[in-house]
Image (tube, rainbow, N blue to C red):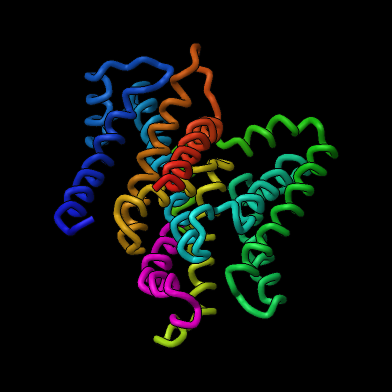
Amino acid sequence: MDGPRRTRAWLLLAAAVPLSVYAALFFGSYPLPADAIHEALAAWLRGAAETQDLVIVRDIRLGRVLLSFLTGAALAVSGGVFQGLLRNPLADPFTLGISSGAACGAALALGLGWALPLPLAALAGAFAAMALVLALSRLAGDFSRESLVLGGIVVSTFLGAAIALIKSLNEESVSAIVFWIMGSFQGRGFEHVRLMLPYLLPGAAIVLALARELDILALGTEQAAQVGVAVGRVRIGLLIGAGMLTAAAVSVSGIIGFVGLVVPHLVRMLMGPSSRALLLFSALGGGILLLWSDVLARTILAHGAELPVGVLTALFGGPFFCLIMARGRRA
């Protein structure tokens, strides 16, 4: 995509973010007219006394909308990093076992009564899984993409078995574990936004700072080393940054698949391979996609019932990605 078209696409996505956040406030199980929403927002800005409408708009809807956007952005950016780092368009946060680690941490908190709050347990599990993958890759003698993928497969398989064991040991927690693994923003709000920001912001800063090196790594390990890139340290830095983004996302939402897989793949097809542009556009596109997926998940059923948003992203993302692959083969 040339410069002017890329600028127009950037402006369009940048404008779509506040419009989407605003429009999403109108959806919920409790009907609120537009005047009530506007009055609630104005009362919040004025610091007026709390009313029922203000609590609904600010604490229940706006916090959840912002959280879903940030989670989608984090998953899409981490997926773009993993795809570029491993030079594999099918890579995503699940490839390196980080999401499985978060699920295992949450399962321990739910099933075995860990003292840690659920989001912090998921964060601990995600970072532990990433450390295991890096350790296994180092045992192989390097941090090549092959050893990282193999380490991720080993860790994911082991952690999947650990989750099954936890569920079998405490049958009372099975439904809570399964629901968390399917991914949901139910009951989430500004508290969870504050919880993820200390991990999301440094992770985003790291991957954006190393975007140029990520482009160079796409040329191959030997070529990158020849132009002065410290390949091992850059890979570890990108893994840590993307791992922090993934951990921040799954710690507040559970496991939400296909956002980190489909969004950067589509952006790469439309915008080209430049990593900085890819990561920025993926952040906006992933955030908007998950925001509206969550709106659909909490409005598609009657009587205030909700679907896990991870179920929707899997239902829509799976066939859509198969279509992309089929078109790629015919091209």
Q: Is residue 46 left or right of residue 62?
A: left
Q: Main secondary structure of the magenta part?
A: helix
Which residue, as the protein is rendered here, is positioned at the far left? 4
Q: Is residue 60 left or right of residue 308?
A: left
Which residue, as the protein is rendered here, is positioned at the far right? 169
Q: Is residue 208 magenta?
A: yes
Quadrant of res 68:
top left
Residue 66 in the image: state x and y as whole percent.
38, 40
Q: Residue 8, relative to residue 244: is it above or below?
A: above
Quadrant of res 109:
top right
Q: Residue at x 73, y 59 (%)?
A: 154
Q: Is residue 114 visible?
A: yes
Q: Residue at x 27, y 32 (%)?
A: 22
Q: Residue 240, relative to residue 97: is it above or below?
A: below
Which of 240 and 47 lies nearest the eye of the viewer?
240
Q: Which residues are magenta?
A: 200-223
Q: Residue at x 47, y 26 (%)?
A: 297
Which of 218 and 191 lies nearest the eye of the viewer?
218
Image quadrant holding the N terminus, namely bottom left
Which residue, as the protein is rendered here, is positioned at the far front? 330
Q: Is residue 184 visible?
A: no
Which of 58 and 268 lies nearest the eye of the viewer?
268
Residue 217 in the image: state x and y as whole percent.
44, 73
Q: Is residue 300 left or right of residue 270?
A: right
Q: Residue 233, relative to residue 74: is it above or below?
A: below
Q: Residue at x 47, y 56 (%)?
A: 78
Residue 238 in the image: state x and y as whole percent.
48, 68
Count of all numbered marks drawn on residues in the image = 0
Residue 215 in the image: state x and y as whole percent.
38, 70
Which of 24 and 195 lies nearest the eye of the viewer?
24
